[in-house]
Amino acid sequence: MKRLLLALITVLFLGNITASAKNKIDHLEPAFWWVGMKNTHLQLLVHGENISDLKPELNYDGVSIEKVSRVSNPNYLFVDLLIDKKTKAGEFDILFKKRKKTAITYKYKLLKREEGSAQRIGFTPKDVMYLITPDRFVNGNPDNDNVKGLSEQADRSNSNGRHGGDIQGMINSLDYISDMGFTAIWVNPLLENDQDKYSYHGYSTTDYYKIDGRYGSNEEYQKLSRLAKEKGVGLIMDVILNHCGSEHWWMKDMPSEDWINNKGEFMQCTHKRSTIQDTYASKEDLKQFSDGWFVKTMPDLNQRNEFMATYLIQNAIWWIEYAGLSGIRVDTYPYSDAAFLAEWTGRVMEEYPNFNIVGEEWSTNPAIVSYWQKGKVNHDGYRSNLPSLMDFPLQNAMVEALTKEETWGTGWIKLYEMLANDFLYADPGNLVIFPDNHDMARIFDQVDRDYDLYKMAMVYTLTMRGIPQIYYGTEILAKSDAGGDHGKLRTDFPGGWKGDKVNAFTGEGLSAQEKDAQNFMRKLMNWRKTSDVIHKGKLMHYAPDLGIYSYFRFTDEGKVMVILNKNKEAVQIETDRYHEMLIGNETGKDVISGKSYPLNGSIEVPARSALILEIN
């Protein structure tokens, strides 16, 4: 059976190749494409020994070879095809000839797109993302924990090793994910990472067109997307444009000297991201940031190379179409070439105008983050096409607001003032907001394991403008090593492995507080799923006073008032302060407790609590 599956995968992704004994194709990417794409151009990367000696030819209605490019390495050809908009799906032979004699025949397929593919809707403020590190979530298929031909083997005792979570585990968990109220899953990278060690995180790609065998197969990824969609859950792919893994196949035989920055030799990145916006930055500092390698095992891709740029653009479109994606998250966004980023996002959004892409710019300065959002008028004239960004400034301000005492310059005022910076963004409502993620301590640790503060953080994240993202396990008070060990903060989800004594899916072994947190989150997110006021509503907030921070989300049809109280005692707040929002309204009902509160005098806000008052 395994041999049969391997044969089927080989036919699909390498095509039907016939070749003479002297000539063969080792890689042809993308291995297939679709008719009816808006962009009618397709560039094939062809790799094989002395492949540049051959001349490609084809004969298929609506398809022609526009150009054949040869580079310094004779083992590469770049073949540009033109696919007419009226071309029909089908397959045809690409003949690679030498002196008019066919040396290799490659059967290429053009597939029919799914109905409405170009009009697909990406993630929106209606959604709540569930961020999953797949190796640490659920081990649905122990048989793929170790895969022949892939270097690193499973070792669950090693916090930085592979633990065995996989795509089947996520498929098995879709009922739980949907029941909790999540409507999208952002999965840390699943593409092949055939590195010797520390590869479970997925950010060292060694094959851009292949799911890592320890997670499953390309077909299983398709299945995850399809089954998730049936439950109202979209799939968001984690994409890395800046770097690949040092064991990527092309690192052993690069097309040209400029395929990888610094001629393929390691040069440490400075990680000084602000050099891009800094009007005083030296060109040398900018070069060391943009062209430096993230780490030694992550070679820095040179997107100024036109073939590399086209390869990465087509790869993203291929996965959107192949897997039916609802969004993309781009890792280390500003580390790539800025002009390329505008082209990459522009090409993707041109093909899928209702899609959404969120970039990671890990800065707590909103002036830096906002630079990258589409529609921002920048000081240097840079025009971005990126719809969304991760709102690191708001996350940092939220933790400071919750954990610092209330003074003139600390506490809630930090969150209030950070939100006041929204004028810097072209579209603040499309930012992704979050309490924690896979690269930072868990929010429960960030608020010193104070359960009341945790609940306030969750209420804020799920009622504020933007698109919430919750890291797996946060709903059950997952803990981490605040000292920075990423392997420990990416802890195994309890119940995801056979024999686990604690099971978050059934509740077995969870503490009373962990169960309460899970039920709290389930109720809050399922309410949010049906709240148009939160999805579409405008925002008005009130300056913090007496340890209270409050804001409204509102539309013409309804209002939601959120009140956050950090005090150790109940606080009476006078409703006349909110007259412009509460005029004509007499009561509000708390979403969590179900208790009604009068709005025409004063409201008693319980100690260390959050109220979410629905006002109709």
Image (tube, rainbow, N blue to C red):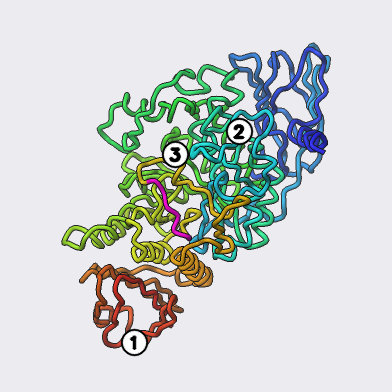
Q: In the rendered view, tell whether residue 198 sits above or below residue 394.
A: above
- Residue most toward the left? 408
Pointer 1: residues within 10 angstroms few (<14), some, or many (20+)? some
User: Residue 67 placed where, x, y %?
Assistant: 67, 25
Question: From where the camera sits, is residue 175 visible?
Answer: yes
Q: Quadrant of the N terminus?
A: top right
Q: Which quadrant of the structure image shows residue 559?
A: bottom left
Dominant secondary structure (helix, strand or loop) of the stretch shown in magenta: loop
- Let me know if residue 478 is in the magenta part: yes
Which residue, given by chain and number where applicable, does mark 3 sit on? Answer: 332
Q: Which one is closest to the eye, mark 3 or mark 1?
A: 1
C-alpha separation, residue under disc 2 versus residue under disc 3: 27 Å
Residue at 39%, 64% (x, y): give it.
464
Assess disc 3: are there few (<14), some (14-19) or many (≥20) residues with their C-alpha within 10 Å of its C-alpha. Answer: some
Question: SS at mark 3?
Answer: loop
Distance from label 2 to label 1 (Cα)? 61 Å
Instruction: Tell me which segment is drawn in magenta.
Output: 476-481
Q: Secondary structure at mark 1?
A: strand
- Of the 4 image quadrants, the one containing the C terminus is bottom left
Q: Position of residue 243 (x, y in %)?
A: 50, 31
Residue at numbered disc 1: 598
Foreground mark, 2 or 1, reads: 2
* On screen, residue 523 above or below 135: below
- Whole-angstrom CA distance, mark 3 to mark 1, is 48 Å
Q: Amino acid at mark 3?
A: Thr
Q: Residue at x 51, y 43 (%)?
A: 345
Q: In the image, residue 436 lies at what x, y percent?
A: 41, 52
